[in-house]
Amino acid sequence: MTHCHNIIDELRKRGFRITPQREMIINAVAHSPHHITAEEIAEKLQEHTKAINIATVYRTLDLLWQEGFARRNDLSEGKIVFSTFQHGPHIHLVCRRCSRVIDADIKMLDSLREDLISNYQFRPNLDHISIFGICADCQA
């Protein structure tokens, strides 16, 4: 069974109705080779059907995020991107000047995770985060 079918089956088990539009949106985000915006999903799907609008895309992506099937992240300038967990944990270093995105090693957050747990009794989800700053090229 493919990744998107696992998500669809689990949502059904949780009592959510899977409309054809929801299924298309889930397929689009699950099969995207990169992070994808709601607008990109809507544009891609509207090439095949007019039965999908941007509000439906946003509602479905929010459902996927709330139910733990997708990650959402800000990659600068309010550009919210989505991905499923098949992309694995990672950190984005986002330059505030040129908007360049650099992937960093997730292991760098291990000590932060432990500190938050031990000092605040807070279990963070640090599997997919963006850290904003200035890249080496823009510093030069």
Image: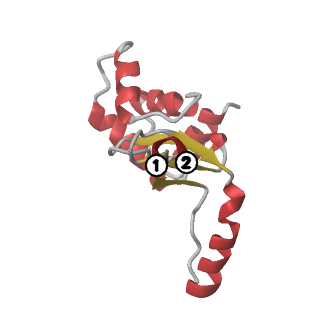
**Image location of residue 129, percent across then percent down:** 53, 54
The answer to whether residue 79 is left or right of residue 114 is left
Which residue bears the numbered disc 1? Answer: 73
In front: 13, or 138?
A: 138
Q: Which amino acid does label 2 sit on?
A: His
The residue that mark 2 highlights is 92
Residue visible at 65% across and 35% down in the picture: 3
Q: How far apart are marks 1 and 2 (CA)?
A: 9 Å
Taking the spot 49% from the left edge, 44% from the top edge, the residue there is 140
Q: Which of marks 1 and 2 is nearer the N terminus?
A: 1
Q: Point out residue 104 in the picture as x, y percentages from the top left corner.
A: 64, 49
Rendered image: mark on residue 13: none
Rendering coords of residue 126 (x, y %): 59, 61
Q: In this view, does 25 lie to the left or right of 121?
A: left
In the rendered structure, which amino acid carries the disc numbered 1?
A: Asn
* Residue 19 placement (x, y as % from top left): 41, 32
Q: Residue furthest bottom?
A: 119
Is label 1 in contact with label 2 (beta carbons under 8 Å)?
Answer: yes
Residue 84 in view (yes/no): no
Helix, strand or loop for disc 1: strand
What kind of colouring is applied to the model shown?
Answer: secondary structure
Does 35 sit above or below residue 16? above
